[in-house]
Image (cartoon, rainbow, N blue to C red):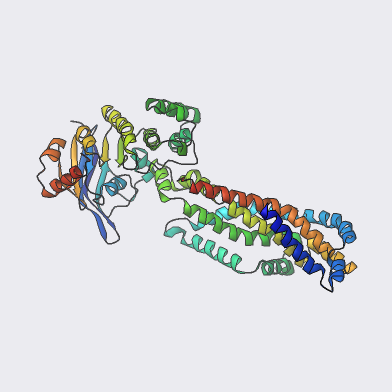
Amino acid sequence: MIAVISTAVFVGIVGLVITSSPSWPLVQQDFFDAETFWRFLPVIARAFVLNIVLFLVVEVLVLTLGLVVAVVRNLPGPVFFPLRLLAVLFADVFRGVPSLLIIYVLGFGIPGLQLPGVPSEPFFWAAVSLTLVYTAYVSEVYRAGIESIHPSQAAAARSLGLSQVQALRFVVIPQAVRRVIPPLLNDFIGLQKDTVLVSYIGVVEAFRTANIEQQAHFNYTPYLALSVIFLVITLPLTRLTDYLVARDRRRLLAGAR
Amino acid sequence: MTSEVVRIEGLHKRFGTLEVLRGIDLALSEHEVVCLIGASGSGKSTLLRCINLLEPIDAGRILIDGHDISQPSVNENKVRQGIGIVFQAFNLFPHMSVLDNVTLGPRRVLRVPRAEAEREATALLDRFGLADKRNGYPDRLSGGQQQRVAIVRALAMKPNLMLLDEITSALDPELVAEVLNVVRELAAGGMTMIIATHEMGFARDIARRVCFLDGGRILEEGPPDQIFSNPTEPRTRQFLDRVIAAGRM
């Protein structure tokens, strides 16, 4: 109850300060125009379908490839050193360079080579770029998960006669994946938002559509519409992630091993 | 003359600069039960882990059924199939039901069909009073139940040698007996076993031979009556005096 009153008062004061500023009417017209909002919401929502498709395709690829990279990075023995090195380099480069630069380099650079048989559609290279960047992130999440499983679990599996690969497949990875679901969801919220970056190489998705409308009508409200669409998609995922994190912490505190 | 299941000769094991095992010689014939006693850090666990190839050894030989398993060319997965090990901390797979814990080895390693593996596992669980737990998960079981499942999991591979590594040390005192009774039953059934334990009373009545480990060597070995009542080495006497003082014997 106190929390509700305190929140209402706080929001009231902030609202009053903003709306009493001298240029508020202008800002309201440019950013919060109701008529513009409702006019462009359907247009932008339709363009947003492309963001969703891009996100879904990339997510499936990232979940698989990320695990492959993580497993390669954990391969034991000197024989696999080159593969391990490659996995480390991959993760370092694609985590270290801004996503936008990767999208630019691949989206403009590779089609620019005009190699026969190589696709040149921006959407294709957009998907490739985001896949590479997020595979690098997600492989680190998986790796942390794999390393968090106590070695005694692998030892117990090996003691039954399971090979290294079988121990990983049946004992270590299933436990590791369960443990990293919340951080994985976090990365996917990031991925959903980063789908707007591909507009820079000419993919006409929701952000680009909002951008076109803004320039045509000298009004920023289309961006507000897009923000609302994003929140509708990301908020449930954010809440779910928070719920899972809280549940895991409760379990840990309850004294589970 | 019964055949020899294990023969260990001059086994050395080092962790970095720390020499944990310094020349272990030990042989077990079929159906024999040997208990390893000694202070923590004397090398009991390491010895068992070496026999199961969970630790590479630095010198010496280990022969299982006459085959030298310390050769680099040996197929370690094959060797481990025939040797069951039970750990102090149970190490059950928490994401699998009791039944899946027990059938994992037979199904994935021995390639036993699922239905058959589950039938055999259920029979084993039943034998050790765990049939009603088969669909439960490890975190729902008491420590004693978990450890019995771990024993069943090892038995499901039909090993001809069992290594028990302080399997009651992590248990509440009232749960120790149910686990030790399982081990007694195994011994009565003729299982060859090497048992590292701090339960001296148990060692006394189950072992044919007791080995006292001290500083990575078997300092003294013999029948339990001799070791416990009339040890020749002063270090053994000292250790047993401390155990008695702690009320553990």
Quarter placement of the N terminus of chain B: top left
Residue B156, position in %: x, y? 39, 32
Does A205 sit left or right of B105 as displayed? right
Along the line of sight, the residue nearer the viewer: B162 or A228: A228
Quarter of the rendering containing residue B15: bottom left
Residue A195, position in %: x, y? 72, 60
Residue at point 23% right, 49% down? Answer: B39
Quarter placement of the C terminus of chain B: top left
B94 versus A144 height, above or below: above
Residue at point 23% right, 42% down? Answer: B36
Asked if residue A102 shows in the view, the reply is yes
Residue A240, position in %: x, y? 64, 49
Quarter of the rendering containing residue A133: bottom right
B206 versus B15 height, above or below: above
Residue B148, position in %: x, y? 37, 34
Asked if residue A116 shows in the view, the reply is no
A28 versus A177 height, above or below: below
Does A226 sit left or right of B209 as displayed? right
As drawn, which residue projects farthest toward the bottom? A22
Residue at point 56% right, 53% down? Answer: A67
Tally of numbered discs = 0
Quarter of the rendering containing residue A135: bottom right
Does A203 sit left or right of A142 as displayed? right
